[in-house]
Image (spheres, rainbow, N blue to C red):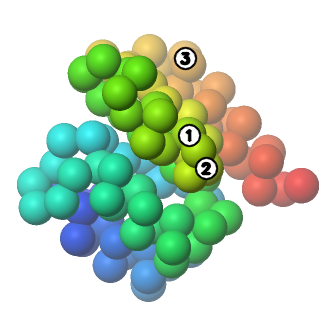
């Protein structure tokens, strides 16, 4: 868990994460830039992007770069659990 984009990127450098949950709004750098940097560090990380904004704006910027999923807040916990399971299963293949 990291409270801003730079700390998330630093954590990704230190640890290979199976899944990264990235909010679009974060202090210092936004979610899209954080997403891009994490994918550079470890392209295999399954990134689930989250936002409370219009999802169409940011899916265009992240889907083509390999985001695993996009969710809108407030988050449906059952859907989040299923996405997490799917991401874990993807990594097993």
Residue underneath mark 1:
63
Q: Tell me residue 40's x, y (percent).
A: 51, 73
Residue underneath mark 3:
78
Q: Is residue 25 above or below residue 1?
A: above
Q: What is the distance, in whole Å, between disc 1 and disc 3 at their CAs?
A: 22 Å
Q: Tell me residue 51's x, y (percent).
A: 30, 29
Closer to the chain start, of discs 1 and 3, is 1
Q: What is the distance, in whole Å, between disc 1 and disc 2 at their CAs?
A: 5 Å
Asked which quadrant contains residue 58, the reply is top left
> Is label 2 or label 3 in front?
2
On screen, residue 71 versus residue 83, left or right, reads left
Tell me whether the residue at label 1 lies in contact with that at label 2, contact meaning CB atoms closer than 8 angstroms: yes
Q: Identify which residue, 82 or 38, lies in the foreground.
A: 38
Residue underneath mark 2:
66
Q: Tell me residue 54's x, y (percent).
A: 30, 18
Tell me whether the residue at label 2 lies in contact with that at label 3, contact meaning CB atoms closer than 8 angstroms: no
Q: Residue at x 25, y 21 (%)?
A: 53
Q: What is the distance, in whole Å, between disc 2 and disc 3 at their CAs?
A: 23 Å
């Amino acid at each position: 868990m990291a409270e801003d984009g730079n700390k998330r990127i630093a954590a990704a450098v230190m640890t290979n994460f199976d899944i990264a949950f990235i909010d679009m709004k974060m202090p210092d750098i936004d979610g899209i830039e954080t997403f891009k940097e994490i994918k550079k560090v470890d392209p295999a990380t399954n990134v689930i992007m989250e936002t409370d904004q219009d999802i169409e704006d940011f899916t265009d910027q992240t889907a083509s770069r390999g985001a695993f999923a996009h969710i809108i807040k407030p988050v449906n916990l059952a859907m989040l659990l299923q996405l997490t399971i799917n991401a874990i299963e993807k990594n097993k293949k």
